[in-house]
Amino acid sequence: MKQSTVVFLAGIVISGTAWTQTSVTPAQGPVAEPAPVAVPVATPVSVKVPKTWVDYITFKGDVRLRGETINDDSKKNSSGEDYTRDRARIRARLKVEAKVNDLKVGIRLSTGGADPVSGNQTLGDGFQKKDIRLDLAYIDYSFLGDSPDELRAIGGKMENPLITMPDDLVWDPDLTPEGLAVKARFGNDFVTVLLNGEGLFIQERDAQKNATGLAGQAALKFQFMPEIGLTVGGTYLAYQNIQGYDVIDWENKNNSYGNSTIPGSVSGSTTNKAWADEFTPVMGFVQLDLWLGFPISFYGQALTNPKADANKNGYMGGVSLGKAKTPKTFEVGYSYTKLEKDATLGMFTDSDRWGGGTDGKGSKFYAKYQITKNLQACATFFLDQKKISAADGGTNYNRLQIDLQAAF
């Protein structure tokens, strides 16, 4: 009986204790909102999407509209009077380049005919369709990968692998040489060494030795401070199997582009012209780049052809102010050039200056304005003399070009 009473009392005590622990005391004042519960946020996981062939290919190109006026005193109209030629021209180019690891392969199509130093097509020929030609087709291999230094080998029809000057004495900017080239660049923040070599395939001949060329170039590029840079260098160029061979003229008009000639082969009643001299021009160049609140550049170039007996020298000097690169920026410039008759092979020189070739001198004035990121306007005026080796000192040649170029 006593045992039952003890058990009963113990049960009451335990029940009372449990009720006391679970009962809620009436709240005094407002009831607080429950504290928010922090929900863990998952860290985004980067998923690497496999590259497709599209990722390795880039496209770029440009379209240029040109209005041009030419006064050439060496040409007369049907009445024997001086005349002015006015024409509208276009140039369009599209380039595709694929890069995989250390290898690049490129192709570019351009308007133009067989002329190696121009991609222009003249408008106003009864709305005829315009020719499109293969302008570039090359393989470019980098031996050093993504290193800041450079060692590359290029083969095919390529952009000029040599360092060229504005208004270069030897090369037209539209020329795309054919052959093999090696380019090297190494250095530090103060000085960069630039080395370029090139083997040219100029003309394949059936029953004669092929016309070829070799070029070697070395330059130093100094960066004395962010506002002052200087580039100095030299180039040696040797053409083989030129002297005594018929001139190479893409128009088949027996044009030597200013160079001295001798009688060559005979085709029916026509005696072709042949080059009278060898061409091994040696040239030096310099460019000083300054920042004086705006960019300013001074540049110059001089060359001589030791294989020629006379009329073998050339020189060019110029200055540019500003840089038409970003929208609403200007650039203006001036240069003076003199290139004697046999200083270099005339067929590859600037086609605008005194009408192309050698044997001329004169001034070039230009102004550029960057309208938008991809649209630029330019005006260029040439005040020249051509055939300066003639007894009368040559004739006047003036040329005005107004360009509008869009790039993408």
Image: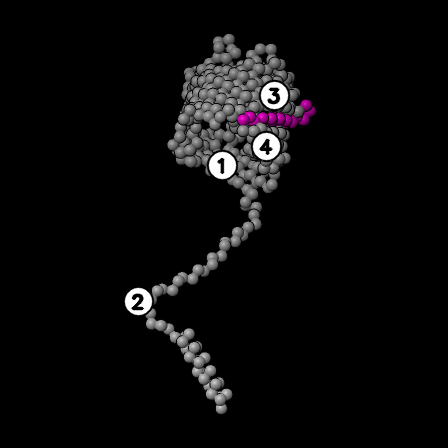
Q: Position of residue 358 (x, y in %)?
A: 53, 17
* Residue at image mark 3: 237
Q: Any mark on residue 149, and which?
A: 4
Dot 1 and dot 3 residues touching (CB under 8 Å):
no
Dot 2 and dot 1 residues touching (CB under 8 Å):
no
Q: What predominant SS class does the magenta segment belong to?
A: strand
* Numbered disc 1: secondary structure: strand
Does 212 sit left or right of 402 as displayed?
A: right
N-terminal of the pair, mark 4 or mark 1, is 1
Dot 3 and dot 4 residues touching (CB under 8 Å):
no
Q: Mark 4 or 1, which is nearer the eye? A: 4
Q: CA distance from mark 4 to mark 1?
A: 28 Å
* Numbered disc 3: secondary structure: strand
Q: Mark 3 or 4, which is nearer the eye? A: 4
Dot 4 amino acid type: Asp
Dot 2 amino acid type: Gly
Q: CA distance from mark 4 to mark 2?
A: 77 Å
Dot 1 amino acid type: Gly
Dot 3 amino acid type: Leu
Residue at the spot 48% in from the left edge and 15% down from the top edge: 361
* Residue at image mark 2: 29
Residue at the spot 56% in from the left edge and 18% down from the top edge: 284
* Residue at image mark 1: 61
